[in-house]
Image: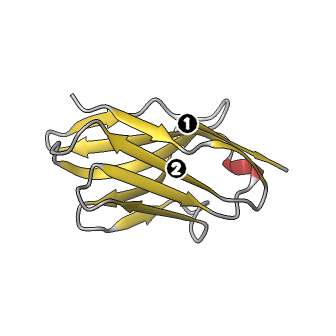
Amino acid sequence: QAQLVESGGGLVEAGGSLRLSCAASRRGFGFTAMAWYRQAPGKQRELVASIVGGGITNYSDSVKGRFTISRNKAFNEVYLQMNNLEPEDTAIYFCKAVRSGPVEYWGQGTQVTVSS
């Protein structure tokens, strides 16, 4: 059973940057995709960015040009570089990993708060 642990959240002023990290408990799970989601208070969880094994990325329109998703070579870690943060980016950010099945794994979430 894969366990995902996120880190890097915190409080930042508008216009600032944060880098989130998500690491699986070990290598060799055979993930085919990893992604970041977020959930703001009173709202549904939404996809922020995703990356597949071949390196193809996908972003929500609200973060295009500001956020960058990347992964390590072993594909058991995924990162989210968030620049030019806005108060609307305030949310709990969750990491998700998928392997064939499909089987999904979720992290516990990390809080990102952007002050105006």
Q: Is residue 61 left or right of residue 86?
A: left
* Type of amino acid at the residue the image marks with label 1: Thr
Residue 64 appears in which quarter of the rendering?
A: bottom right
- Figure quadrant of the N terminus: top left
**Closest to the observer, 74 or 109:** 74
Relative to 112, say whether 77 is above or below.
below
Q: Position of residue 47 (x, y in %)?
A: 48, 48
Q: How many labels does the image show?
A: 2
The three-letter code of the residue at mark 2 reads: Leu
Residue drawn at 28 percent across, 49 percent down: 76
Secondary structure, mark 1, is: strand
Per the image, the residue denoted by label 2 is 20
Task: Give the labeled residue for mark 1.
Answer: 110
Whole-percent x and y of residue 12? 74, 49
Is residue 24 left or right of 30 when viewed as pictured?
A: right
x 58%, y 71%: residue: 65
